[in-house]
């Protein structure tokens, strides 16, 4: 039997009511220790004391990679980084809509007016908004097909590949599991390279037995890429029959119905689907999809094909996609000009809601106009009334055209590499980094994430399906902080 719970900020008393729907409660969760109905209160003062493991890293690693305050990640005091997300009750969809309206309404209106009347032209947009290409009906039909395909894919992802984690060190930071990092973590699905498609110079003449050649986004290591450990990084193969392959196909068909994006794609095809997961304070910091030279065109080492659009489909709670303008200003160091960030009140904030399809237009990253836009994304600063706080859980499904290629194992989806790790890859090989993977706290993080992902699916994808709290690997005495 399911019951309806009404929760107040100053009162933990549970009430049965027919007036306010704020969450479904699974009776199985009532029998778990320290778990209130659909909510878990952490025990304060239960910090886990960890001894510093014997670090066998190289001297170069010890000298170079320092966290804030000059300390390694495993030397930080408990409480410096919160990594275990609080349990998310079901029924947050209505709360998410109200919080977004109350908190973000004015910001979105100001951004819309600024983009509308500004002399700095802005091209990126939601593909189903302001349609003027004459294919309105066909675009809406194709969008409904994409909605169904993404729903199937997300259920597949949450039940299967969502539980993949990896050591991550973005911008040379000390390595931590991707679920512990401040940035939203990624899962990659890549289409196989067909026989009639050209192979990269470093791939030609090779044939790895037991491996499949696929397109790749963010290959490599270091500050300019996704910062995943090359020895454990995984890329899942997305064939035409795979749910991810179906999503890529429909995304491309939908984009090509708009003449602008059809011209930008040309003979290229969407071949990599990346999935980003946001919760709480996780974010994607400011960046450009295509790295550019200062005044001229794109750099040669881009893994994404320059000049092609990126399609972002949002599932779950709302999140913010923020565009930051960079403009040429007289340099203080020399007689020429430099690109500098404008004031924060000039940022353009776009709301991404459930089933929204956003197109990042490559023209917004062109520097030939004397200005360009970077973008970031997060779910920060959303507070719920009548509750301690509201933290969204949102998944972005992104399709793009990539030009890099890697060999992926047919057995475990790991990426083949016969090269020696780069200098900045040594950060992954520390005992401190690898000791976290598989630990009790790591299992605790994933137990909470499984619960949050499943309740998000109930809210937004299948309200009739009863997914109970999964306590596998859960330890209610574990610290909620990364030590």
Image (tube, rainbow, N blue to C red):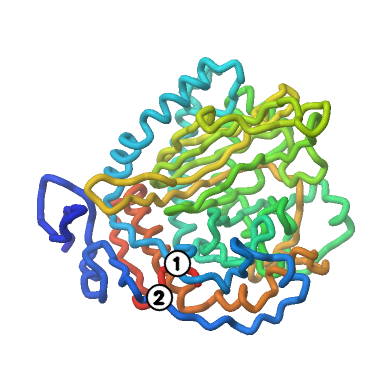
Can you say whether 481 is above or below 380 in the image?
below
- Judge left or right: residue 34 versus residue 320: left
Q: Which residue is under mark 1?
A: 79
Can you say whether 138 is above or below 354 in the image?
above
- The residue most toward the front is 332
Q: Position of residue 326 (x, y in %)?
A: 65, 30
Q: Residues within 10 Å of mark 1 (few under 14, many from 20)?
A: few
Q: Residue at x 25, y 51 (%)?
A: 387
Q: Earlier in the sequence, mark 1 or mark 2?
A: 2
Q: Residues within 10 Å of mark 2 (few under 14, many from 20)?
A: some
Closer to us: 141 or 398: 398
- Judge left or right: residue 252 versus residue 90: right
Considering the numbered disc 2 on the image, is that residue within a helix, a strand or a loop?
A: loop
Identify the image quadrant of the N terminus: bottom left
Q: Which residue is under mark 2?
A: 47
- Judge left or right: residue 230 versus residue 159: right
Q: Position of residue 459 (x, y in %)?
A: 32, 50
Q: Position of residue 188 (x, y in %)?
A: 61, 55
């Amino acid at each position: 039997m399911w019951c309806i719970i009404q929760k107040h900020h100053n009162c933990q008393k549970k009430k049965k009511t027919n007036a306010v729907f704020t969450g479904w409660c699974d009776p199985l969760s009532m029998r778990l220790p320290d778990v209130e109905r659909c909510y878990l209160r952490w025990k304060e003062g239960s910090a886990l004391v960890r001894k510093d493991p014997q670090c066998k890293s190289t001297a170069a690693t010890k000298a170079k990679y320092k966290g804030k305050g000059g300390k390694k990640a495993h030397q930080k005091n408990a409480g410096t980084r919160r990594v275990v997300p609080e349990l998310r009750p079901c029924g947050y969809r209505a709360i998410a809509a109200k919080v977004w309206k109350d908190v973000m309404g004015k910001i979105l209106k100001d951004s819309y007016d600024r983009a509308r009347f500004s002399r700095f032209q802005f091209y990126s947009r939601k593909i189903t908004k302001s349609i003027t290409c004459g294919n309105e009906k066909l675009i809406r039909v194709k969008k409904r097909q994409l909605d169904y395909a993404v729903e199937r894919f997300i259920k597949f992802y949450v039940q299967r590949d969502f539980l993949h984690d990896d050591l991550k060190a973005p911008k040379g930071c000390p390595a931590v599991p991707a679920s512990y990092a401040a940035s939203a973590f990624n899962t990659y699905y890549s289409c196989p390279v067909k026989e009639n498609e050209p192979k990269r110079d470093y791939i030609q003449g090779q044939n790895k037995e037991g491996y499949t050649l696929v397109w790749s986004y963010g290959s490599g290591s270091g500050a300019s890429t996704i910062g995943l450990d090359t020895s454990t990084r995984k890329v899942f193969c997305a064939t035409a029959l795979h749910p991810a392959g179906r999503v890529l196909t429909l995304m491309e068909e939908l984009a090509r119905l708009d003449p602008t994006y059809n011209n930008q794609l040309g003979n290229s095809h969407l071949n990599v689907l990346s999935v980003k997961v946001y919760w709480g304070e996780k974010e994607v910091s400011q960046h450009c999809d295509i790295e550019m030279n200062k005044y001229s065109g794109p750099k040669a080492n881009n893994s994404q094909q320059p000049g092609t659009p990126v399609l972002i489909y949002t599932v779950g709670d709302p999140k913010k996609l923020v565009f930051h303008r960079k403009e040429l200003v007289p340099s203080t160091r020399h007689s020429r000009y430099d690109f500098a960030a404008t004031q924060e009140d000039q940022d353009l904030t776009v709301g991404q809601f459930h089933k929204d399809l956003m197109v990042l237009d490559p023209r917004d990253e062109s520097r030939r106009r004397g200005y360009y836009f970077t973008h970031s994304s997060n779910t920060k600063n959303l507070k719920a009334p009548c509750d301690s706080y509201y933290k969204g859980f949102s998944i972005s499904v992104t399709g793009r055209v990539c030009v890099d290629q890697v060999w992926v194992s047919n057995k475990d989806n790991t990426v083949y590499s016969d090269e020696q790790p780069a200098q900045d890859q040594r950060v992954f090989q520390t005992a401190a980094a690898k000791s976290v993977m598989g630990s009790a706290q790591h299992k605790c993080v994933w137990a909470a994430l499984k619960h949050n992902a499943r309740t998000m699916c109930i809210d937004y994808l299948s309200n009739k399906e009863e997914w109970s709290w999964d306590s596998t690997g859960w330890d209610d005495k574990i610290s909620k902080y990364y030590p």
